[in-house]
Amino acid sequence: MMNKFENFVFGILDNPKKKKMVLILTAVAFVLSLLMFPTKIVLAKMLPGKSDNTFSVYVDTPSGTSIEQTNRVSQCVIDLMKKENEVLNIELFLGQGMPLDYAGLVKGSGMKQAENVAEIAVNLTDKHERDEPSYLMVKRLRPIVQKQCEGIIKNTSIKFVEQPAGPPTMASIVVEVHGDNIQKDRDISSDVVKILKSTNGLVDVDIFGDKMYQQYQLIPDKEKIAGSGVSVEQLNNILYLAFEGMIVGEKNTQEYSDQIPIFLSLDKESKSMESSDELDVQNKLSSLNLMSPTGAMVSVSDLVTLKKVDSNPVIMHKDLDRMINVVAETDMVSQVYPLLDARSKMIDYFSKNYEVTKVPGMSTYMFDLNLKDKKTGEKFLLRWDGEMKVTLDTFRDLGGAFIAALVLIFLLLVVYYKSFTLSGIVLLGSFLSLIGVIVGHFVANLVTRDTFFLTATSLIGFIALMGISSRNSLLLIDFAKSLMECHGIPKRKAIAVAAATRAKPIALTAVAIILGSALLASDPIFGGLGVALISGTIAAVFVSLLFVPILMDNAKAMDFEPEVCDIKEDISITK
Amino acid sequence: MIMQTQHEVYKTKDIAGRLASGFLKNPLTALLGAFLLLMGYLALSIMPREEDPQIAISGGTIMVAMPGATANEVEKVIVNPLERRLREIKGIEHIQGMAMDNVGIVNVMYYIGQNREDSNLKLYDKVMQNMDELPKGAMQPIVKPFDIDIDIPIVTVAFYAKDPKKINQVQLYNKIRSIQQELNGIDSVSKTTLKGDHRAQYNVQVDLNKLSGYNLSLGQIMQGIQAVANGVPSVKSRTSNGGMVVLGVKNAIESVEDVGNIAVADYGGSLIYLRDVATVTEGTDIQNFKNATIMFRDESGSKMSNEYAQTTLSISKLAGTNAVNVANDVLDVLKNNDRMLQDAGIGYVVTRNYGTRADNAVNELMQHLIITIIIISIMLIFALGWRESLIVTFTVPAILAITLFVAYLGGQTINRITLFAFLLSLGLLVDAAIIVIENIHRHLHSHTAENQSMEELLVEATDEIGPPTNIATLAIILTMVPMAFVGGMMGSFMKPIPLNVPVALVASLFVAYIFTPYLSLKLLKKPTHNSTHKETK
């Protein structure tokens, strides 16, 4: 067995044609596997979804919606949820966020406190006893729920929120529309929403920020107020007291754990208006009286004039710039591809009215677009943030870590061998395990039900692989070197013998790594690491037993002269 | 032993051989092994368990209210100057401002990994220093730093009234309040909060028609109530002979009836009481629009229950404490209160328990680790023989024990990522032992084996592969080191990998050099075949 392998390696080394073929085959395999990225055969994503025992639904009705209306939408969602067999319990939090979790932390769930928000927490049966992973369940329910419930109140947005597998981000895709002109910002962002909505693979598209709605402005008549002897402050107070109510006193108690407040407001009938018509509002105000210092009653409607205006939308800033956020989630796909799709659509669309330029250079903001209004010359910036930014940052950092690792290993080898060529061989050999990593992901994608992404953990696996495969080459070179030095075995033969002898421990440790990573591969998050280690190790074994010997044979640095070894015992070459 | 005279005693050249020969005959070696395993076990049982590693996220929110100002005004006089000032702080990654009618909010996010206490202090400091720049009419700024550990509850419990007629929201609230008090007494519990709670309140709802009928204004009603609602502390006075007289004014309002009996006006000689113009009830805080409900599957799991109004009690833990223990303590308190809750007609559902989640995740991964070790040892039986396999299998728990103990000393917690680091290193850390045992195996079966004593052979076999193994392991460690410098959330999230894998690898070297030859001496024997095998090369 061992002799056979020894002869096989020697056969290759001794035949320049065979040697060339192995080298060419390796190069072809390397190029082909790299081509799997641009051809989208292997897809990249930061982290895949993880099945969990819970997910939540955020209901956002437009600003100015009452709690009763928000409740109606929420009840619609709950009605659909409770039909699901795997749902254990459903909690509804009206007018507030649910108890904070990792997803809510960055999505502003803790700050929610308004009549137009609700959060629904859905707890499922244990993931081990359930066939359908939570992310597939969300994917299935999302269109049904949105179709049936978003129509109840116009402009409602219903978002499904899953627990992130890794660190939380605000949304998969965030487009920040920067610009000083708020009105234009709003226009651009609604165009962005339209484009994102028409892009395949994107769901839950929403503008982060409130919609404008109609409201009445009460304009105090200064002369009348001065004439009647009341103050504007008094007027404000009375209006607030009447419609919102106020706590006007507290009572201490031994019976309860808190003070009991005394709350004063108008009763329901007195508060409610016939309709939101100006006349009805005017009527209600006229029945509300203020008392002047002289004791005379003055009607509120006498002191103010009514005016219908648009509400003041919230002005958002990021890093001192005015901007508006548009968010979108991905529907079980990587965010990279819909992003590029949407981006080219945006370039087409905005080219009509704006000069669109791409941000030059490579950075983690490299997808940003600069817009310049053709008429006014106003400048706007479309910035991609969210998970995409985190992904780019992470891949950049991991890439940097990888290069640093390469350099460190190379220096270490140079110190050890005192030869650049030998160190280069080891490094090249370990780099080629990338073939295995990419092909492994391709195979994993074929055999799994959902898309198997190349993730950040795959990269970590690859970095670890570098070390593992360089060790294989190291042991090989070391062994061949001492065979040549101490035994005077000719170079080619020595390399073949070394490959054959080292084949067993190399294969053994490889099997250990493969078995050790087998269970890792089934994990949703660390699957990439597992697959990278398994397939990369297989590739590394082939590379170090076939490819590296050829390089060693070709390298002049491998020509060691026989010398007197102080090793008393020879390196035995028995089975 | 005659052979010894012919051969020089093998001289060790590498740390590998030195370690091997040093510990080979040492009686303390076995003790050291046992000690390491014990330390690892101790670390495993006392280390805090969590599901996800802790990420040091610092940041905060500053809120400044300015009643009556529009969004545009708020932007100009509050948000813009505040943002400019905050920009002066070092270590801030993003500042997000929101200007809306009446209030301005600025959110600050520090770079990941910034010291939390320092960051909070800097934030306070900057806001306080610039208080004088606040515009007239603005209220005192509210600074709220956020803290993941405290803000994210690990257990949430939803309490509901089984029969809403029997127990009202206020009684429910009071019962939960008493449980909350008890929970706060538990070790390592930091913050407990209520959601969906409704408190007792006297509601005075004025009928506008009646009000105008008596020709009264709302302002008068307010003044009327305020006039009697204040509690007064006892007053003291002296008698002429130096004694003390204490006068205590009884609270004017003792019950809801007292509120109704407040006289608000004198209308043509007859007093008008509050109850004449308003409905006065003892109820809950009607102005609070926040509500919470729950529906759940019944015991049999077949049907969804009705929707109940509920109050959720959420419990957070202190940083660096064991989620599992805290969660269990909380559940114990609930169990102790079971009777009381039953009697009161209150049911509860535990809607979140990160404790069990963390425990399950950790236990599942521990299981994976054990399965993997077993698989590897079976593989080795076939490849090397059962004695050799046994030796390698022993090294794994020893290495993991050392790594766990070091992690414990470093203040880490056991979480998903730590265990993944272990799983990842598992394939790597048996390598050193495999390489050593394989070389021993080879030497034992080589033709020179008879000429050497067992001890010498073991030391030599270990020593021989020392240099390349050291370099190779160092190479793997070097690949892991740069990962520690990956920034951002992902870097912090993955940190246990660069922290633990190198430790495990270094430990694997030491264990391989110390324990593999030691155990080989105890377990392996030289093959007794008389070798006629002749080396030809």
Image (spheres, rainbow, N blue to C red):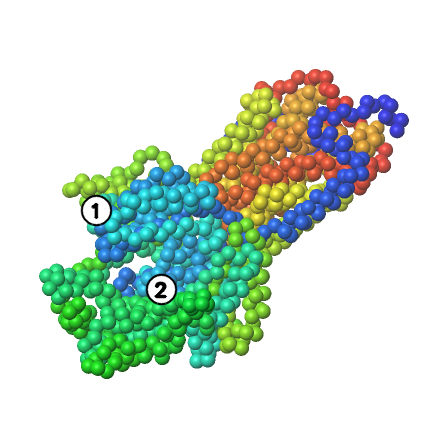
Count of numbered circles on the image: 2
Mark nearest the camera among 1 and 2 is 2
Q: Residues within 10 Å of mark 1 (few under 14, many from 20)?
A: few
Direction from residue A187 to residue A259 in the image, left or right: right
Query: Which residue is under mark 1?
Result: A181
Q: Residues within 10 Å of mark 2 (few under 14, many from 20)?
A: many
Query: Which residue is under mark 2?
Result: A95
Direction from residue A125 to residue B247 in the image, left or right: left
Q: Chain of mark 1?
A: A
Dots 1 and 2 on the same chain: yes
Indicate whether B520 appears above or below A552: below
The outermost residue toward the front is B241
Q: Residue at x 40, y 42 (%)?
A: B122
Residue A406 can be seen, yes or no: yes
Q: Chain of mark 2?
A: A
Q: Which of marks 2 and 1 precedes in the sequence?
A: 2
Direction from residue B445 to residue A530 in the image, left or right: left
